[in-house]
Image (cartoon, rainbow, N blue to C red):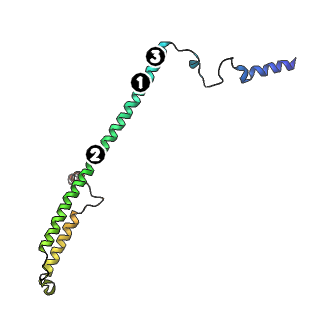
């Protein structure tokens, strides 16, 4: 008799015997899922899901707009740098033409007489300085940013 009671208690407390017939063995299933929803409740759930989807899509669109704005600003700076490069290229070309025009002819005796040596070295240094100022380096700022930087430096003084 004791064995029968123990066996009955063991079966009653086991997880398999606690399940009702026809109910799935998924313990994560809630009572709300097991209960049928009314058509109004089902429609409200669908509306809530659609609203959630709409809000997520709006956030995606906002993020995309922000990225596009950042890309446009970056592109504007790059266009500015290209324009600066073209202007500086023109300056360098004019400088080269000026050097060529002021150069001596092959029949000149100046290299041998060296009468204007100091004047020529001064001209050479001037050309080198102008060429150096016209170069574009990787750290060269676009003109708009350079103007802002100079303005803030002047206002700080």
Q: Secondary structure at mark 2?
A: helix
Residue at 31% x, 43% y: name it. Answer: 70
Precedes in sequence: disc 1 or disc 3: 3
Q: Position of residue 47 (x, y in %)?
A: 43, 20
Residue 39 % position (x, y) = 49, 13
Say if mark 2 contacts mark 1, CB within 8 Å: no
SS state under label 1: helix
- In the displayed orientation, state which residue is furthest to the bottom: 113
Q: Residue tagged by mark 2?
A: 73
Pick the residue in front: 141 or 79: 79
Picture quarter with the N terminus: top right
Judge from the rendering whether residue 63 lies leftward or rightward of residue 142; answer left or right: right
Above-or-below relation of 120 to 53: below
Q: Which mark is residue 9?
A: none
Q: Is residue 51 above or below residue 122?
A: above
Q: Which mark is residue 43?
A: 3
**Left or right: residue 57 compared with residue 93:** right
| Residue at image location 26% in from the left, 55% down from the top | 141
The residue carrying mark 1 is 51
């Amino acid at each position: 008799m004791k064995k029968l009671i123990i066996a009955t208690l063991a079966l009653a407390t086991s997880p398999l015997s606690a399940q009702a017939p026809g109910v799935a063995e998924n313990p994560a299933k809630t009572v709300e899922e097991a209960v049928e929803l009314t058509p109004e409740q089902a429609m409200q759930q669908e509306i809530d899901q659609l609203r959630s989807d709409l809000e997520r899509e709006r956030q995606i669109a906002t993020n995309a707009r922000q990225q596009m704005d950042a890309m446009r600003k970056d592109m504007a700076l790059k266009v500015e740098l290209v324009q600066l490069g073209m202007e500086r290229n023109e300056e360098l070309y004019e400088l080269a033409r000026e050097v060529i025009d002021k150069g001596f002819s092959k029949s000149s005796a100046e290299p041998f007489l060296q009468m204007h040596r100091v004047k020529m070295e001064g001209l050479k240094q001037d050309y080198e300085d102008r060429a150096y100022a016209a170069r574009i380096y990787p750290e060269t700022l676009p003109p708009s940013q350079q103007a802002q930087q100079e303005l803030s430096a002047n206002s700080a003084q």
